[in-house]
Structures are given as structure tokens and as C-alpha cells.
Image (cartoon, rainbow, N blue to C red):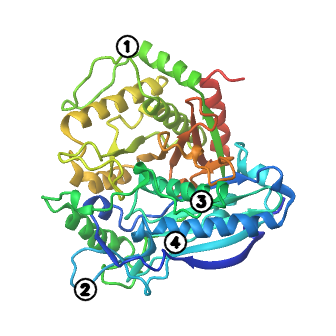
């Protein structure tokens, strides 16, 4: 099978703008946004099989799919105007801003491509070369003076299906917001596909109407300026070859880790989660965890969330698999992001469009992850971290995040992260030709991160995406299946 990287063909590169009636739009960046200012893009790809009987009709993609996707994208952008603009940094502003100017900003970059890759192999859960997925997501432009907010790519797999790849700037929107945009686009496109005769202008349901007022995020202690200075002063020193004064919007290099790496997807069913939960709770009071004195010890819960169980199980399997290949790597830490929309002193609307997440490091000992009872220990610590966060506030110790990360790196502690959410409902996103055959988060290949999503079968399970060294993946698969008693 030919590698997708050598078989991609570009049919068209265009820019999709909102309708010409769109007005200029400008928005500040909040401290939540500025914390991610030069972070790598977040990427997601949706793969769709052609519905029967269109699979063998070569004109269906170019005469039906593409026109509908383009038209509905333009209509969607009138609700999400800032996505058609850029991040800019005016000379009289201490921090960058978001700006859309009709006529000047040409809209969202859209690439129409074709691939000879084996579609069935790409959407299969079994391991395949990590580099394969790179062909189906677009590059996100960033320069010293400005940075794009999103870019899109639609890839045709003749006689099989197509994919929609999206690359988003993390300083503008988090996972919940990017998913809201995709759902809004799908909703308007679906309306066009199923009701071609309708002359009415479709509207969005309330939960997909974005709340764009960033002024609702309060910053009394100046965290926005604090994070901006970290990016401009401290982190720029790590990249001395960059010729700029620090006031740059160029995304820092976080290259994908593709050499000898494979990507695979694993399913944790509802029954699997129940098994893990029973095992963890049965040993809850027997595990002696060395915790810092200031961290409260909470009583045994009646149940545990799917999130806690999945994160504990997967992170421990990853750590043990890595340690199985590289015996000198024994220290790990797990971090996750939490949605702060309803957890701030002044809560923001659930449909707030922007970043409103913050990262949390789990208070574990570095060797807990390779402990025989690692899943129990880590699950207990994640549960306690969430309880503590809800009691003391999600922004407790927020200004220490960068220094904590630097300290962990200096101590040789591997950070395991997570992307996505099983609450986003990505497998329900239907543009009018059916639900996705597969959803991937390509950007997890830029670090030791696993992605999670709702299960495709809709039965309450969780899908886990991973990119690991081939030998590490082999051990991970063995540990993962053995722990769930899978033959």
C-alpha cells in the first residue's frame, strides 16, 4: 500500500469567507487564551464513508459534497466571525487580539485534496503508521505579525469516502468550542442536504449559537499579562535562533513524533469500565498512598466517573509499556484539563466560545504509575484532585503552572496528557451523509498524550487514541487487553 504522504493530490486551495454582509469584528484574548498563545495547533479529523448508492459515483464528491460543504461553511462563519480573521498584535496593545476585517481578511483556508490511501485501513482501529494521519490535516499558518485561527482540509478517498480535517489555534478556542463550530457547520450543511428545495435560511439551535463576549472572563490579578510575558521573555529564550523581539505570534516548534511510531485506537466498553471501577473501589481503603500533607484525604466514593477510570487505566498502561521498553524511565505524572465555564466565581455561559479550560497535575508519586496497583493509586489521586479542585477553586495555583512543568522536566519526569472528551459527542456529527466512520486527534503525536471520545456505538463506552513507539504499542496492547481480561 502506498504511503498517504506520497499519494496526496491537491485539487484546490481556496478561502471561504462569511457572507458579504458580515461586519468587522474585534475581540480581546483572555488569560485562558494567552496561556496557550504559542502552543501547537489542536487537530481533529472526521472520516465519512460514502452513503449507498453514491460510493461508485465519481461525481458525487465534487458535485454534491464539496458545494454543500463550502456553502454551509460560509453560512456558519457568519455566526463565528472571529474564525475568519486572525490573531494580530497591534503596536499599542500589551497583548494580542482577535480581528476580522471584511475585504482585508480573506476567510478560512480550505484545501480540497485526494488520497490513494486505503480508506478501510485508515479507519480501522488496528495500529498503522503514525505518519499516515498527517496527510489529512492542514497546516495552520503563523507568523511574527499574525496567525490564522483555523484551517480546513477535505480529502477525497475515491469510491470509499472523505475526511474533514481541522487545525485550530489553541489561543482562540478549546476542544469544546472547536467541537461546537464543527457541530454548527454540520447542522447547517445537513439542512441543505436533506432539504434541497427549501428557500429558508436555516438557524442554529441555541446550544450551538456561540457566546462571543470575552469580557465575561475577569482577570483582576493580571494573569493575561503574566502569561504573555512568559511567552515573550522566558520561552523565547529557549529558541534563540528566532529573530524577533519576543512580540511574535509564530507557533513554537512542537514537531510530530513520527519515527518508528504507530497510531491505534482502543475501545473501553461500559462493561470494561464497570470491571475497573469494582477493582479500584474494592482496594480503595487498602492502598497506602504517600500524599503531601496539605492534600486532603477524601472518603471512599460510592462510584467513580468514566473519566477517572479511563485516565487511570490508560495512563498506567502507557507508563508500564514505556518502562517495559526503556527500563530507565520510571517516573511519570498525569495532567488533564478541566472545563471552567461553570466553575468560576462568576460563571460563564455553557456556550461561551473561546478557551475556558485549565490544566491540573495529579498529585502522585512519580513511580506510582509502574506500581503493581498503579490503577488503584492513580484513580484515587485523580478523584482526590478533582474533589480538591471543586473545594478550593479551579484556578488554585494557576500562576505556578509553567514553573511546575519546568520542574518536572528537569527531574526527568514524563508527563502523560489527555486530549478530547467523551462528552463532546463527536460520533454524532452528521453533515447529511451519515455519522463518522472514525474520528481521530492527529495532534496527540506531538507529545505523550492520548485522546478520548465517546464510543461510536453509542452504548456509553470510551474510545482511546494513542501514538506510541511500535515496541511500546505492542506492550501497551498486551497490558490493556490483559487488564480487561480480553483474550
- Residue picked out by circle 1: 286
- Residue picked out by circle 2: 91
Kindly give the residue lying farthest to the left in the view shown: 220
Earlier along the polypeptide chain: callout 2 or callout 3? 2
**Position of residue 417 measured from the top left corner of the image (x, y, whole percent):** 45, 46
Q: Residue 409 carries which label?
A: none
Q: Where is the C terminus found, in terms of image quarters?
A: top right
Check disc 1 and report its element: helix, strand or loop: loop
Which is more foreground, mark 2 or mark 3? 3
Rendered view: 324 above or below 244: above
- Residue picked out by circle 3: 189
Q: Dots 2 and 3: beta carbons under 8 Å?
A: no
Label 2 and label 3: CA atoms lie apart by: 40 Å
- Residue picked out by circle 4: 140
Earlier along the polypeptide chain: callout 3 or callout 1? 3
Label 1 and label 2: CA atoms lie apart by: 60 Å
Residue at point 49%, 37% (across, down): 315
Crowding at label 2, few (<14), some or many (≥20) Cα neighbours within 10 Å?
few
Label 2 and label 4: CA atoms lie apart by: 24 Å
In the image: residue 197, left or right of residue 6? left
**Does residue 254 appear in the picture of this structure?**
no
**Position of residue 221 measured from the top left corner of the image (x, y, whole percent):** 13, 59
Label 1 and label 4: CA atoms lie apart by: 49 Å
Check disc 2 and report its element: helix, strand or loop: loop
Which is more foreground, mark 1 or mark 2? 2
Check disc 4 and report its element: helix, strand or loop: loop
Crowding at label 3, few (<14), some or many (≥20) Cα neighbours within 10 Å?
many
Check disc 3 and report its element: helix, strand or loop: helix
Label 4 and label 3: CA atoms lie apart by: 24 Å
Amino acid at each position: 500500500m502506498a504511503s498517504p504522504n506520497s499519494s496526496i493530490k491537491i485539487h484546490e486551495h481556496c478561502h471561504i469567507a462569511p457572507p458579504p454582509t458580515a461586519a468587522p469584528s474585534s475581540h480581546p484574548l483572555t488569560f485562558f487564551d494567552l496561556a496557550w498563545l504559542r502552543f501547537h495547533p489542536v487537530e481533529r479529523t472526521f472520516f465519512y464513508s460514502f452513503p449507498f448508492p453514491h460510493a461508485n459515483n465519481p461525481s458525487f464528491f465534487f458535485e454534491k459534497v464539496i458545494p454543500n460543504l463550502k456553502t454551509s461553511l460560509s453560512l456558519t462563519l457568519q455566526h463565528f466571525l472571529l474564525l475568519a480573521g486572525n490573531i494580530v498584535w497591534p503596536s499599542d496593545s500589551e497583548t494580542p487580539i482577535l480581528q476580522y476585517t471584511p475585504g482585508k481578511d480573506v476567510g478560512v483556508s480550505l484545501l480540497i485534496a485526494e488520497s490513494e490511501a486505503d480508506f478501510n485501513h485508515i479507519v480501522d482501529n488496528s495500529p498503522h503508521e503514525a505518519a499516515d494521519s498527517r496527510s489529512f490535516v492542514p497546516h495552520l499558518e503563523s507568523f511574527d505579525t499574525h496567525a490564522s485561527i483555523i484551517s480546513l482540509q477535505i480529502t477525497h478517498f475515491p469510491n470509499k469516502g472523505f475526511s474533514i480535517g481541522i487545525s485550530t489555534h489553541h489561543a482562540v478556542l478549546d476542544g469544546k468550542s472547536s467541537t461546537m463550530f464543527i457541530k454548527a457547520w454540520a447542522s447547517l450543511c445537513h439542512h441543505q442536504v436533506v432539504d434541497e428545495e427549501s428557500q429558508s435560511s436555516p438557524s442554529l439551535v441555541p446550544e450551538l449559537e456561540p457566546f462571543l463576549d470575552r469580557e465575561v472572563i475577569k482577570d483582576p490579578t493580571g494573569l493575561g499579562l503574566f502569561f504573555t510575558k512568559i511567552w515573550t521573555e522566558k520561552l523565547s529564550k529557549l529558541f534563540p535562533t528566532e529573530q524577533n523581539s519576543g512580540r511574535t505570534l509564530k507557533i513554537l516548534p512542537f514537531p510530530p513524533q513520527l519515527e518508528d511510531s504507530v497510531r491505534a485506537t482502543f475501545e473501553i466498553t461500559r462493561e470494561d469500565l464497570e470491571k475497573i471501577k469494582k477493582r479500584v473501589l474494592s482496594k480503595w481503603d487498602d492502598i497506602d498512598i504517600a500524599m503531601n500533607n496539605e492534600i486532603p484525604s477524601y472518603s471512599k466514593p460510592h462510584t467513580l466517573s468514566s473519566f477517572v477510570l479511563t485516565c487511570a487505566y490508560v495512563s498506567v498502561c502507557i507508563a508500564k509499556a514505556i518502562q517495559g521498553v526503556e527500563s530507565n524511565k520510571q517516573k511519570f505524572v498525569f495532567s488533564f484539563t478541566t472545563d471552567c465555564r461553570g466553575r468560576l466565581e462568576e460563571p460563564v455561559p455553557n456556550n461561551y466560545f473561546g478557551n475556558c479550560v485549565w490544566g491540573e497535575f495529579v498529585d502522585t508519586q512519580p513511580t506510582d504509575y509502574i506500581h503493581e496497583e498503579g490503577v488503584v493509586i492513580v484513580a484515587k489521586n485523580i478523584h482526590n484532585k478533582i474533589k480538591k479542585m471543586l473545594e478550593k477553586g479551579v484556578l488554585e495555583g494557576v500562576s505556578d503552572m509553567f514553573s511546575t512543568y519546568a520542574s518536572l522536566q528537569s527531574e526527568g519526569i514524563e508527563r502523560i496528557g489527555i486530549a478530547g472528551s467523551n462528552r463532546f459527542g463527536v460520533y454524532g456529527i452528521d453533515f447529511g451523509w451519515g455519522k463518522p466512520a472514525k474520528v481521530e486527534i492527529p495532534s496527540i503525536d506531538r507529545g505523550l498524550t492520548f485522546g478520548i471520545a465517546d464510543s461510536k456505538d453509542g452504548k456509553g463506552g470510551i474510545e482511546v487514541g494513542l501514538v506510541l513507539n511500535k515496541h511500546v504499542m505492542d506492550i501497551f496492547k498486551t497490558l490493556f487487553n490483559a487488564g480487561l481480561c480480553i483474550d
